[in-house]
Amino acid sequence: MEDITPVELKKRISANENLHIVDVREVWEYEEKNIGALNIPLNTLPERLEEIEHWKNEELIVHCRSGARSANAKKYLEQQGFTKVRNLLQGIEGYIVL
């Protein structure tokens, strides 16, 4: 599925859409600043898949700081059968500058 831009995500959050967002940054990064996503650090994703299994066929947005780790998370989730994964381009850094 096509990735999502910070502008599109910000519009959808502002419209109070019910979004499924996973932040794959480390806990300390999440604690510094976050957008309210579920925090599952990338290295713990395999053992925590059951927490998001119910979103397997729904749009699932993943993000990190800049978009690189979440791109890896997207690939991994797609390999696990997730069908609608979108990576937040530019990560939270691109999002917070808007």
Image: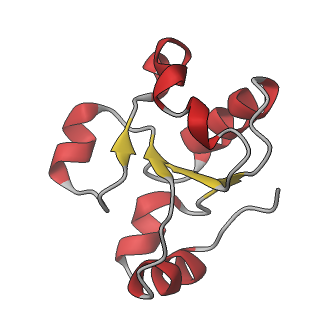
Task: Identify the residue shown where x is 68% and y is 52%.
Answer: 58
Q: Residue furthest top?
A: 47
Q: Relative to 73, is 44 above or below?
A: above
Name the foreground residue: 58 vs 75: 58
Residue at 59% in and 81% down: 8
Q: How many marks?
A: 0
| Residue 73 vs residue 20, the one in the foreground | 20
- Above-or-below relation of 39 to 67: above
Which quadrant is home to the N terminus? Answer: bottom right
Q: Residue at x 59, y 30 (%)?
A: 53
Residue 82: percent from left, percent from top: 74, 37
Nearest the camera: 48 or 18? 18
Asked where in the image residue 38 lies, by quadrant, the reply is top left
User: Residue 36's image quarter?
Assistant: bottom left
Q: Quadrant of the C terminus?
A: bottom left
Q: Is residue 20 or residue 29 the one in the foreground?
A: 20
Q: Residue 55's spot in the image, x, y percent?
A: 61, 42
Q: Is residue 6 left or right of residue 24?
A: right
The type of colouring in the image is: secondary structure
Residue situated furthest front in the rendering = 54
